[in-house]
Image (cartoon, coloured by chain):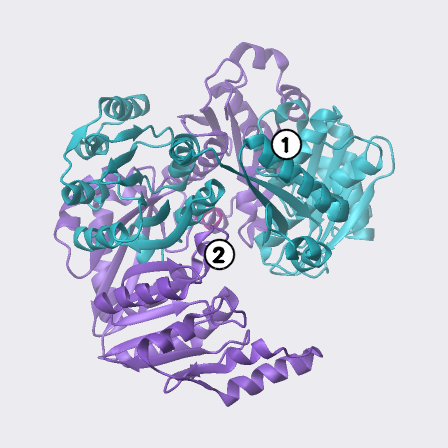
Chain colours: A purple, B cyan
Amino acid sequence: MNAEIIAVGSELLLGQIANTNAKFISTQLSELGINVFYHTAVGDNAGRLKDVIEIAESRSDLIIFSGGLGPTKDDLTKETIANHLGVPLVFDNVALTYIEEYFAQRGREMTENNRKQALVLEGSKVLANHHGMAPGMILEQNGRTYILLPGPPKEIEPMFQFEVKPKLAALLNDGGVIVSHVLRFYGIGEAELEVQVQDILDNQSNPTVAPLASDGEVTLRITAKANSENEAWDLIKAKEGEILNIVGEYHYGNNDDSLASKTVEMLLHNKLTISAAESLTAGLFQSELAEIPGVSSILVGGVVTYTEQAKVTQLGIEKSFLDEFGIVSSECAAAMASKVRQKFGTDIGIGLTGAAGPEPHDGQAAGTIWIGFSIGDSDPITRKLQLSGMRNTNRIRAVKLAFSYLMRLLHEKGYEKV
Amino acid sequence: MNAEIIAVGSELLLGQIANTNAKFISTQLSELGINVFYHTAVGDNAGRLKDVIEIAESRSDLIIFSGGLGPTKDDLTKETIANHLGVPLVFDNVALTYIEEYFAQRGREMTENNRKQALVLEGSKVLANHHGMAPGMILEQNGRTYILLPGPPKEIEPMFQFEVKPKLAALLNDGGVIVSHVLRFYGIGEAELEVQVQDILDNQSNPTVAPLASDGEVTLRITAKANSENEAWDLIKAKEGEILNIVGEYHYGNNDDSLASKTVEMLLHNKLTISAAESLTAGLFQSELAEIPGVSSILVGGVVTYTEQAKVTQLGIEKSFLDEFGIVSSECAAAMASKVRQKFGTDIGIGLTGAAGPEPHDGQAAGTIWIGFSIGDSDPITRKLQLSGMRNTNRIRAVKLAFSYLMRLLHEKGYEKV
């Protein structure tokens, strides 16, 4: 079964909203093992919509529409499909009653154009909308399946999950399942990772292995088809083992993990508390940790020392020390890490200092960043970064690299990875 | 000129990412007055990409591609276009040198597949990529314009703004211009704003006025067509005046302004320094300020006091005080603001404390947040928020509201808005 998703709405073509419905539906179809070969977005225009439907019919057997089911004149998805397929629109009494009740409950008068939302394609399976007024529809015609869904994400998402997905699963039910698993890597470029696992990428069949890079990370998605979920997981685990044998040192987590969430997990697991002194990142390192629920057992707090004066008065670093080594220096990052660790009484202290850009800072080029790690009573360890992004990309990457280095350093010191 | 945007990448069809590039490019084209009639997304498959190109050629004269210019075998956009149009790929020396330097600077070995990124369509105008390795291209052929752009948003956005947009504007230059201006509002809902400016929305022709809500903000985009830029701006300024007469009190900035950038501008203009003590936001307030270049004249720093103990030891708030009033309280927010202002010697101190969620904190429901403002020697002022979002939405909204309240409080105290 090959699917195509057609989003209808001029607001997409004007760039007012992104086509998140196509993303959502694609994820859902991918979980069912249905191939999606095309996404299309088209405006509220019957002629162009009809053309798009004809193209879709020439290449796909499952055509899913989102949007254009509402009460206004611009909403013309079902009218265009009805016209194109020669299927009349008829009132659905359940939907009509629901819409009338909706207005009655709110004490608002129901205008005539709202009745239009209860019109459905004759012979279609009507899908209840529990979060809005326009019902969805599934129509089987000429060997193709047409699914019409409303545009607002809060309506389409539950309708797809609870109404559409079980029906598609039943249509597909040949006893097979598809399972996907994403491996996340950091500290290696996409091209380099691909070279290292080239043999696996060249000789894939089932499971398949697909690389994807974003935000300085690289992921590999392993997807297995099998007769049962257990069998699919066996295939995935075997392939995962092969991959991690080669590039395991860069692997930090799976699926929805982030560098921050894995750092928090590792600190919780090893019962290590943390504090940070931040200059160019100005609180971003700590804020990213605080995104993770449960962080209060390990994050005590820290300081933002944006100016030189704040480094002196708040951390107690000597002015003469900063004059000698510079603010953007290994020595300064190490001192910030040690001082904040002592001040907050934590197991770990992190120091972040550098020139975020666009201007050089303290004689150092934009993108020069030092990170200090003070772990227990050992001498602090520092890492230098030379980044080439814009100001905020540099700040964000510095924080990601701090998490990545911290996990590696802790692992090297014998703390367990999770 | 009718445009179509083709995004290439299997990750879109798997639902791993949303097609935000199509949204971004559409907004930009809309500002230029170019109609976008279709968005298409297609996977990393030469045959299907070729089909999609042929369909686009049958209905559009400007075809913009995003993605598929990278180093891996999956990246086949330019190869497919080259093959389809019969245009050879040649090495671009500037791009090749840039890629070689990129690796040399990082001390990493350049693998052979990275060279492929410097291949461009012969005869195309090459667009420099200052945030990645793959250059973009503009090719004029058979009366159509093909524009090839990289996939990562941080690469495509500056490339479009600085390289593509001026070239398209020049292509379009028939003496008429289109100018857009966005007004940004905070502290008013979309529906309420729309009701207040209903007459303007109902009677628009040139300029047009379009509302859009996102992330707790509402914007109004004013777009004017005229024979000259000056004439367009006169139309826009007149309409802006009408709008601000009605809802000016909620207006905080225009175009690319953010609440953080306007706060920084106002503090710079009034020469006011700031520090913050953050609990639930854990550095996010300071980090957002630090996104703005030039902030070092006004942001001294601050503390993250995530635990109760840190509030006591780092800010010198008495334990008995916290026991009496609670951590999530007006009193605690006020004390945090005063203490951090004194500790960092700034004109303004901000205190943020609350229950981010998902769990209640210190007996207060998730979403209960207090913000304290200590301005000069006046008594601190506090504001309570009762938010209903998820943990991180609550943290982000608390920071936005802190900026918004701070600007209003300063204005009430007689400081100039900018």
- Where residue A292 sits in the image (x, y, percent)? 53, 51
Foreground residue among B354 and A297: B354
Disc assigned to residue A343: 1
CA distance for labels 1 and 2: 53 Å
- Where residue A61 sits in the image (x, y, percent)? 25, 72
- Where residue B164 sits in the image (x, y, percent)? 38, 34
Disc assigned to residue B380: none
Foreground residue among B64 and A136: B64
The structure residue drawn at horizontal position 50% and vertical position 26%, both measured from the top left corner, is A356
Q: Chain of mark 1?
A: A
B68 is higher (above) or lower (below) than A374: below
A362 in the magenta segment: no
B212 is higher (above) or lower (below) than B160: below
**Residues drawn in magenta:** A262-266
Q: Is residue A327 left or right of residue A231?
A: right
The residue where tag 2 is placed is A11
